[in-house]
Image (cartoon, rainbow, N blue to C red):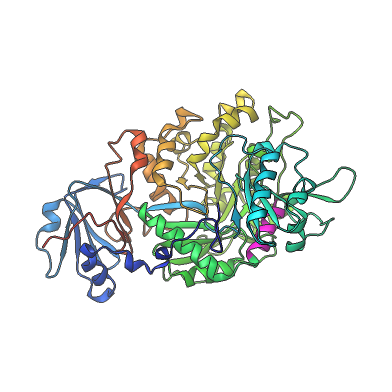
């Protein structure tokens, strides 16, 4: 799959248009009026099923908007009575309106190059080493020397001891190569890539990461994991012009608003926080983006002092504490069933983990929020132990420390998570990996995987993110997996709970629940009118859902041209 110079997917030129050009002619009156804040008339969406996200009053018929906020929610009769001059009325025709979806965990930016395959093999083993070599040979023949060649790989290459740069170099001597583990944790590079990126044959392991080495030597094989991998992404993106990354964001956002997203909580692996914020502000995206700092060392600066004006804000610091079970790098207590000699390993030394907690236990909680990727039970134990050692509930209960994924958060730790005020951000697409996890874990561990319903029952705040990379995942796919939970059906959510976790819960997870995540007076007018009633659709039918109309800050950022303003 050739991506050219615009990143992972070929960007269509029209996706780079300013967001106001996405407004359909029928709703141009809203676009024009809301573009001038002091002159915006009241707009009433009526005759629908408004899911407010407010537990005490979850449903209404109509919602009224002025400028960038919701001013009223209620019955058609109440909101249509005594409208002020110039008010705009939009008939919903019974359609469902929800608060805008908030992807609490997403990665937009990807390196530029020629992607030679897709990840449609997930959760299967992926291409063999021989198949990868054939892909690379074809790519090398079709592209100029020096072009980056990329491919996605799975367990077939992960577990092949012959998968080293010595197997890649003969077919790609003149092209830098990176094979990306589809999990986002692991890269295999050839010797030319090492040269291009400034990686020496005996490159030392960086903080939190490692290079695999040939037996009995310090010479690296080209297999790179955790913070060593993140450093490679940093080096790759350093060679990408800002304008190209701006185009990636614009294309991603243009696709996201069509699905009803109004907020992205983005963890830009490979960009410094300062560069990420500068690029986001230059992109002028149609939706809100929270830029979460992703430092590579404890000493790297995060830009946590800016203001919250506009749609872009920088807040939070994310750390990776272990890998994933797919590569057997999640840090677990019970050895892996298919490799009893392995339990994974922690990425962060204990002193670094506690140092970060000490550094961020003061200051505005919304900015200094800590987010920990922690999948294995031993990694989760390490985070909770460190929180106890740096003040416990007295310090952390109101700081909303986040556990990202938490797949092996077992029942005996749920009480600790609640007492420490932690938020769990789960990714329902991970629930489809049951065949892989059944191989990795003994039955007693497999039976406890990926809690959702029990977290809510215990009073633990829950948010949903997609963990998408490079292109938006449909929120309706996430909802489907959340309400069916293929790995652990007894932990499935109701659709109401899942939508709440994807809206109000995600807003809580970023300290923004005071102004978004619900459709209620005073909240920001971020919402989506859906193409079907997801609350009464059969689960498989959820996948056909899109947004017909998406508003951010009271402005139309996507209009499918279906709805009409009353004459």
Whether 156 is drawn above or below 552: the answer is: above
Residue furthest toward the right? 216
Q: Report the label total.
A: 0
Is the stretch drawn in magenta largely helix, strand or loop? Answer: helix
Q: Residue 547 versus residue 12: which sits nearer the camera? A: 12
**Residue drawn 51% across the image and 71% down it:** 306
Q: Position of residue 208 (x, y in %)?
A: 72, 52
Residue furthest toward the top? 443
Whether 304 is drawn above or below 257: the answer is: below
Residue stretch in magenta: 226-237
399 in magenta = no
Whether 431 is drawn above or below 231: the answer is: above
Q: Position of residue 157 (x, y in %)?
A: 69, 39
Q: Quadrant of residue 543?
A: top left
Q: Is residue 320 visible?
A: no
Q: Residue 39 versus residue 459: which sits nearer the camera? A: 39
Q: Position of residue 184 (x, y in %)?
A: 61, 48
221 horizontally vs 298: left or right: right
Q: In the picture, which quadrant includes the C terminus?
A: bottom left
Q: Is residue 473 visible?
A: yes
261 horizontally vs 197: left or right: left
Q: Residue 124 versus residue 257: which sits nearer the camera? A: 124
Q: Quadrant of residue 91?
A: bottom left
Q: Quadrant of residue 566?
A: bottom left
Q: Position of residue 398 (x, y in %)?
A: 50, 53
**Residue drawn 21% across the image and 68% down it:** 29
């Amino acid at each position: 799959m050739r991506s050219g110079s615009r990143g992972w997917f070929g960007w269509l030129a029209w996706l780079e248009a300013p967001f106001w050009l996405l407004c359909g002619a029928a709703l141009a009156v809203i676009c024009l009026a809301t573009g001038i804040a002091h002159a915006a008339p009241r707009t009433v969406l009526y005759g629908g099923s408004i899911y407010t996200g407010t537990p005490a009053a979850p449903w209404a018929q109509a919602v009224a908007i002025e400028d960038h906020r919701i001013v009223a929610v209620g019955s058609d009769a109440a909101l249509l009575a005594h409208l002020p001059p110039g008010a705009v009325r939009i008939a919903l025709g019974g359609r469902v309106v929800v608060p805008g979806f908030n992807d609490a965990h997403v990665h937009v930016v990807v390196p530029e190059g020629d992607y030679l395959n897709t990840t449609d093999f997930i959760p299967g083993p992926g291409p063999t080493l021989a198949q990868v070599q054939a892909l690379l040979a074809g790519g090398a023949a079709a592209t100029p020397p020096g072009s980056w060649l990329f491919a996605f790989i799975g367990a077939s290459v992960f577990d092949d001891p012959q998968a080293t740069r010595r197997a890649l170099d003969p077919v790609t001597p003149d092209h830098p190569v990176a094979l990306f583990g589809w999990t986002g944790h692991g890269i295999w590079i050839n010797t030319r890539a090492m040269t291009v990126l400034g990686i020496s044959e005996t490159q030392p392991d960086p903080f939190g990461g490692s290079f695999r080495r040939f037996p009995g030597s310090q010479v690296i094989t080209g297999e790179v994991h955790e913070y060593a991998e993140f450093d490679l992404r940093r080096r790759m993106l350093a060679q990408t012009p800002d304008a190209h990354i701006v185009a990636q964001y614009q294309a991603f956002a243009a696709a996201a608003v069509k699905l009803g997203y109004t907020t992205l909580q983005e963890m830009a692996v490979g960009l410094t926080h300062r560069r990420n914020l500068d690029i986001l502000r230059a992109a002028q995206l149609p939706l809100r983006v929270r830029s979460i700092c992703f430092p590579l060392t404890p000493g790297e600066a995060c830009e946590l002092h800016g203001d919250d004006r506009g749609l872009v804000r920088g807040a939070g610091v994310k750390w990776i504490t272990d890998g994933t079970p797919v590569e057997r790098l999640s840090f677990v207590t019970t050895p892996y069933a298919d490799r009893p000699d392995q339990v994974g390993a922690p990425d962060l030394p204990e002193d670094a983990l506690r140092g970060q907690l000490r550094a961020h236990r003061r200051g505005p909680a919304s900015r200094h929020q800590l987010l920990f990727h922690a999948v294995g039970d031993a990694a989760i134990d390490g985070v909770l132990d460190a929180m106890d050692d740096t003040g416990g509930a007295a310090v952390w209960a109101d700081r909303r420390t986040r556990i990202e994924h938490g797949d092996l958060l077992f029942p005996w730790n749920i009480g600790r998570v609640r007492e420490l005020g932690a938020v769990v951000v789960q990714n329902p697409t991970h629930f489809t990996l049951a065949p892989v996890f059944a191989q990795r874990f003994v039955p007693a561990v497999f039976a406890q995987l990926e809690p959702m319903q029990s977290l809510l029952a215990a009073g633990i705040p829950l948010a949903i993110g997609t963990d998408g990379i490079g292109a938006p995942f449909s929120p309706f796919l996430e909802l489907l997996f959340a309400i069916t939970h293929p790995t652990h059906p007894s932990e499935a959510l109701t659709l109401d709970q899942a939508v709440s976790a994807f809206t109000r819960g995600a807003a809580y997870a970023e300290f923004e629940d005071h102004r978004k995540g619900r459709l209620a007076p005073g909240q920001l007018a971020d919402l989506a009118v859906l193409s079907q009633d997801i609350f009464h659709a059969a689960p498989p039918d959820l996948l056909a859902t899109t947004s017909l109309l998406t508003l951010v800050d009271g402005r139309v950022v996507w209009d499918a041209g279906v709805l009409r303003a009353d004459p």
